[in-house]
Amino acid sequence: MNTQTPLDPFETALLAELRRVVQQGSARRHRGRDLLAAAAVLAVVGLGATWLLPSDDSNPLAPREAAAATVLTQAAEAAADRPAGQGIYWHTSMVRTYPLGDQTGGNGRVDQAWVRKDGIHWFRYGDGPIKRDPESQGFRVCDKGVDYEALAALPAEPTELRAALARLMRNNDDGPVPSDAQQAFVTACTVDLLSLLPVSPAVRAAGFRSLIAQPGAKNLGPAVDGRGRHGTELEFPDGDDTLRVILDPTTGLLLQSESGTKGNTARTLELEAGWTNTLG
């Protein structure tokens, strides 16, 4: 005799979502990863991450939370589908807020940078003039200066990408990273890779997927960044500190990152990152 407890509406909807992901995965190159992500929904539901579905009574998944892995997988798929873009300069625009209101870095100021593939930099702080930086060359990954060719050669497989970032960290230009801080350091490098560096869509997608394996990752639910943009907030433990990011999983864009302890955090608000033919 069947004594199993009937599924409630949430469980029924969750299984339907699992079947949908599995069916989609059969037609994708990354089928195995899609299946693992779908399994993660069942394995860790309730541990963090909000389903990115309408929050109304007609959606039985809305009141519950799913794994951070689900959100990162969605962001990876969106990032892989974004065009690579092209241009003369890699342009970034951001607002940085430093711990305890430290003004030395231009708190709340919009800073911009332009970098050619040959590594030549230009910058603008706030409303100031655009200036060339005669000392800055190339790109920085995990505190290691690299040229564009090395950046373009980063692997587009999550485990291999994380290993490559770890090698750069161990040979960085600023000295040894304590062993107990290395995992968090590489995670922070991955976040920079997602938002600030001109890597291919496939490498950016691999960066999102590599974060899935980070212990203690949590989804803190819907959030609004410093410019009022809506996304999902994830948290990654870093010893006594935490690294929090707000991303838009539907576009694969990272909107904001914040690190430090409560009341003493540094925040970077990502406004723009992409190729352009215009300096200024």
Image: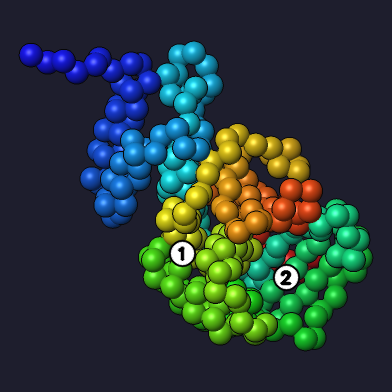
User: Tag 2: Cα neighbours inside 10 Å, few (<14), some, or many (≥20)?
Assistant: many
Farthest residue to the left: give it. Answer: 1
The kind of secondary structure element at disc 1 is helix
Residue drawn 86% across the image and 65% down it: 105
Rendered-image quadrant of the C terminus: bottom right
Residue tagged 1: 203
Q: Is the residue 202 above or below the residue 119 in the image?
A: above
Image x and y of residue 41, in percent: 37, 38
Asked if residue 152 can be seen in this view, the reply is no
Q: Earlier in the sequence, mark 2 or mark 1?
A: 2
Q: Which mark is residue 87?
A: none
Image x and y of residue 33, in percent: 32, 52
Task: Count up the numbered dots.
Answer: 2
CB within 8 Å, label 2 to label 1:
no
Residue tagged 2: 114
Q: Is residue 153 left or right of residue 173?
A: left
Q: Is the residue 229 above or below the residue 161 in the image?
A: above
- Give 187 or 261, whichever is nearer the viewer: 261
Rendered-image quadrant of the N terminus: top left
The kind of secondary structure element at disc 2 is strand
Query: Hey, which quadrant is residue 12 in on the image?
Result: top left
Query: Hey, which quadrant is residue 14 in on the image?
Result: top left
Residue drawn 19% across the image and 18% down it: 4
- Give 97 or 20, whichever is nearer the viewer: 97
Image x and y of residue 272, in percent: 69, 55
- Give 55 or 197, whichever is nearer the viewer: 55
Which amino acid type is shown beneath numbered disc 1? Answer: Val
Q: Is residue 196 left or right of residue 93?
A: left
Q: Nearer the viewer, mark 2 or mark 1?
A: 1
